[in-house]
Amino acid sequence: MKYSVVIPAFNEAGLLGACVDGARAAFAARGETAEIVVCDNNSTDGTAAVAAGRGARVVFQPANQISLARNTGAAAAGGDWLVFIDADSRLSPETLGAALALMRGGRCCGGSALIAFDPPPPWWGALLTGGWNLLSRIFSLGAGSFMFCRADAFRDCGGFSAELYAGEEVALTRALKAWGRPRGQGFTVITGAPHVSSGRKFRLYTFGELALGALRCVPHPFRSLRDPSKLNVFYEGRRKSKENE
């Protein structure tokens, strides 16, 4: 069984090296190897050079859209299973071990994990995180910072929706569930080993800004997820190189 780790990256020179190294170390700790594919999503810093220096395969996507970046990376990957992680996150041997067990079990076509942040977020960030994790548990929803799936299922489902600028992981979760149902395979969320990401957004944005961004999407959520101007938290570009450190 072959594994590919796909990492979309926009101006992530400060954190990408640790992400790539951590993914490779996690697989080694489980007695496995994986190819690492980094999609440089039109970065203006040294993201591509950092990825190449770590031995990752680097591909380029000129349009700044997370779903397109993930799809471009997946198109270049040769694994039987695709593991998607964000460039500001760290894949632990524990999370990977639980995922590998599901991949080998034969009854899973995809999955994800609960999420955590390092350093821990402020109290309001902890509430938001807890709310997402509750929904993820109840409805088996995948988090974009860590998802895995069969490569053939990913292709058959059309990958991440190119129409969405956010929420594309939820759309893919639903598609994978539909793909797996007649095949006796499900989508599983790992609850015992959360995937850890940077708490960067909680430093860059206040509670009011995050809440306002969410409220702006409430009247027309499906339309808003197709409009990057309403998704400032993801596409505003406030992040600077010093925030990557």
Image (cartoon, rainbow, N blue to C red):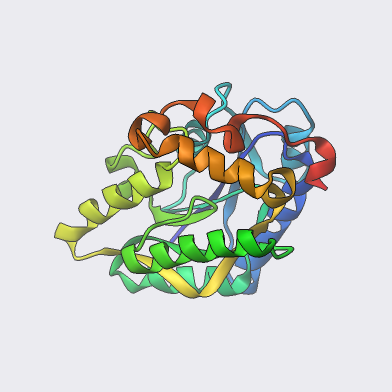
- Tell me if 166 is positioned left or right of 87 in this view: left
Quarter of the figure with the N terminus: bottom left
Question: Residue at the spot x=34%, y=73% of the render?
Answer: 105
- Tell me if 181 is positioned left or right of 58 in this view: left
Residue 158 in picture, x, y percent from top left:
32, 37
Question: Residue at the spot x=26%, y=56% of the render?
Answer: 177
- Tell me if 168 is positioned left or right of 176 in this view: right
Identify which residue, 24 or 213, lies in the foreground. 213
Q: Identify the image quadrant of residue 119.
A: bottom right
Residue 89 in picture, x, y percent from top left:
65, 55
Question: Residue at the spot x=61%, y=71% of the render?
Answer: 93
Residue 37 shows up from this direction = no
Q: Identify the image quadrant of residue 232.
A: top right
Task: Say if 224 sits above or below 139 in the image.
Answer: above
Question: Residue at the spot x=47%, y=68% of the render?
Answer: 99
Residue 188 shows up from this direction = yes
